[in-house]
Amino acid sequence: MSMSILKRGQRKISAAAIMLALWALFLLSALVISWALDIDARLSISGEGNRMLKAEALACSGAEVALHPMVNPGSSNLSGQLNDGGSYEAHLTGEAGRLDVNWLVAGEDPGKLEILRRFLENKGVDLNERDTMVDSLLDWVEPNMGLHRLNAPPESDNYHPPHALLAQIDELKKVAGWADFTAQPGWDDDLTVNSRQGVDLTWASHDVLLALPGMTPDVVDRFLQLRQGPDGVDGTEDDMQFKSVDEALSTLGFNPQQAKQLEPYVAMKTPVFRVISVGTVGKAKRTVQMVFRRVGVQPQLITWKEF
């Protein structure tokens, strides 16, 4: 009787031992699988990180190429392909083709402010909104804290104009009345704070040209057709090369009086450029945006942004 009980006890102990062994094996397998998945995830993250670093390096390479004084907007050197499949594509344009907001509001020149108002009107901003936006911007940059424009909101605990020119174009998002405008995609495509001068006719877009005194849709369309040449693209070999502002305005058919009205607000072939360079490795993509001034053989960097 006791032997039978002993054998049954031994069998129970053996079964329990087997169950414990199986449970231990299960836990060990789970740990191994978890470890393997973690290693695989780390390798995947590491690989993606390496590709992002390579894409960033390629974007920087494209930007560096654009800095060379012999590289022009239509140069084939602005794009490149590596043996491992990585590539960069850089786009070089004149920064002064955009409206410099600081230049427009400095000194509160009625002619410059009218250009800003026309630009906003052409963008669909109604009269009351334009008045608020322009007056608020003037208050924002006004060094005298005691002055306050009629259509601008007063300063408060939640609204503090710095009374200084804009340090960067994104600062417009903080100016009263500009929230809806700056929320639109591409709102800053035609604006800058980096050229510090009038509009460069070599690079100005349709909307920028239309904001200038004396410009009509027909005149702008005709000018762009001449400037861009048969391929319809700025910065290529078939572009019409205007030697001066006077030549450009004469080509447009402006009489001396019209030209005199426009001349204070325009320029030609200014040395400030913007380059947007995109580096790509597989699905990884990085972009570098740079604004610089070409002075001799050593360019002067104005802004640098990576995204």
Image (tube, rainbow, N blue to C red):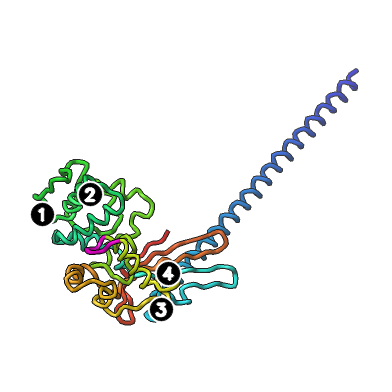
Q: Secondary structure at mark 2?
A: helix
Q: Position of residue 114 (x, y in %)?
A: 19, 58
Q: Which residue is mark 2?
A: 130
Q: Position of residue 129 (x, y in %)?
A: 23, 46
- Quarter of the picture containing the C terminus is bottom left
Alpha carbon separation for disc pair 3 and 4: 21 Å
Q: Nearer the viewer, mark 4 or mark 1?
A: 4
Alpha carbon separation for disc pair 3 and 2: 40 Å
- Which residue is located at x 18 percent, y 57 percent? 164
In reply to whether residue 186 is colored magenta, the answer given is no
- Quarter of the picture containing the N terminus is top right
In reply to whether residue 215 is colored magenta, the answer given is yes
Asked if residue 256 lies left or right of residue 293, the reply is: left
User: What's the residue type where badge 3 is placed?
Assistant: Val
Looking at the image, tell me whether mark 4 or mark 1 is earlier in sequence order. 1
Stretch in magenta: 211-216
Residue 71 marker: 3
Helix, strand or loop: magenta stretch: loop
Alpha carbon separation for disc pair 4 and 1: 47 Å
Q: Secondary structure at mark 3?
A: loop
Residue 144 marker: 1
Q: Position of residue 296 (x, y in %)?
A: 30, 82
User: What's the residue type where badge 4 is placed?
Assistant: Gly
Residue 75 marker: none
Question: Contact (CB < 8 A) between labels 2 and 4?
Answer: no
- Which residue is located at x 22 percent, y 41 percent? 158
Compared with residue 241, is residue 145 higher up or lower down, i.e. above or below? above
Q: Which residue is mark 4?
A: 232
Looking at the image, tell me whether mark 3 or mark 2 is earlier in sequence order. 3
- Which residue is located at x 52 percent, y 65 percent? 54
Question: Contact (CB < 8 A) between labels 3 and 2?
Answer: no
